[in-house]
Image (spheres, grey):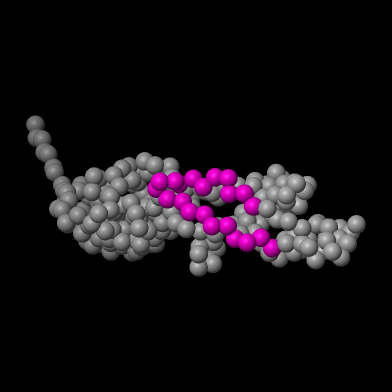
Amino acid sequence: YNARLGLSFSFGRDPGSGDIAVRARPFARYGAVSAQAFLDSDNDGVFDPDERPIEGAGFSGPRMPREVRTDANGNSFIVGLEPYRATEIGLNEATLEDPFWASSSAPVRVVTRPGSATTLLFPVIETGEVDGTVLVGRPNGGALRPGGGLKVYLRELSGAVVAETETAYDGYYFFDRIPYGHYELALDPRQLAELGYAAVPPRSVSIGAEEPFAVGQDMLAPPDPVVTAAGGNAEGQTD
């Protein structure tokens, strides 16, 4: 009787951690990715020394192994990718330990080469929620009713729109997965004017680690006094 036992393995350096990794698949024939996930507390996309690596994060993509997870240092060395073929790699948010964590970067399209590793950083940010109700009508004892179908914008202080939505029939609006920061809530002035309401000043709102949920951010749109003086009323009707 004859018996043979073969053992085949290869090793390569993970550029993310600097460690030597041993794998069954040959490094020289396939591409590799060194991916690192971390909690980007200042939302600058840079892994600073005082920021926390994320363990147990997985990745998504058409050719990504589903079982791959980051280690305690936030690193994952992914070997065996088909070389010279574009591969889209993103962070699988379903694998993150906190449901309010979100990837701050879109999936990355990379083309790997045999025997080399591409280094990718995946910053993760903390997010919160903002909600409230929009009412329309006369304040100070006048008739108020829900402002349904109104556009609500969440803007950075620079004026850039972060998110927009439309109020429900009862005037309620809701923004979720909003990165920590300082913002303004604003109604659409053109829409308000078309409906016979006065412009509403923006409302300041902040969300952060101490208070990630800004609830009850209500706004009131009164009738436009010019329209009222002309004998009309809100919604473009005439008395």
Quadrant where the C terminus sits is bottom right
Q: Outermost residue, front direction?
A: 140
Is residue 68 rendered to the left or right of residue 137? left
Residue positioned most to the right: 239
Classify residue 115 as left or right of residue 46.
left
Can see residue 78? Answer: no
For this rendering, which residue is in front, 17 or 33?
A: 17
Q: Is residue 41 magenta?
A: no
Residue at (20% x, 48% y) in the render: 23
Q: Is residue 207 above or below residue 46?
A: above
Image quadrant assignment for residue 115:
bottom left
Farthest left residue in view: 1
What residue lies at 25% left-to-right and 60% top-to-bottom?
117
Q: Nearer the viewer, residue 225 or 128?
A: 225
Q: Which quadrant, please, contains the N terminus? A: top left
Magenta stretch prevailing secondary structure = loop
Image location (x, y in percent) of residue 179: 45, 54
Residue 20 pos. (x, y %): 14, 53
Q: Tell whether position 209 is magenta.
A: yes
At horizontal 70% and vertical 49% (from top left) the residue drawn is 135
- The percent coordinates of residue 102 (x first, y second) are 42, 50
Q: Residue at x 37, y 44 (%)?
A: 96
Highlighted range, magenta: 199-219
Q: Give how far across and how far down residue 46 sits, in percent.
A: 31, 61
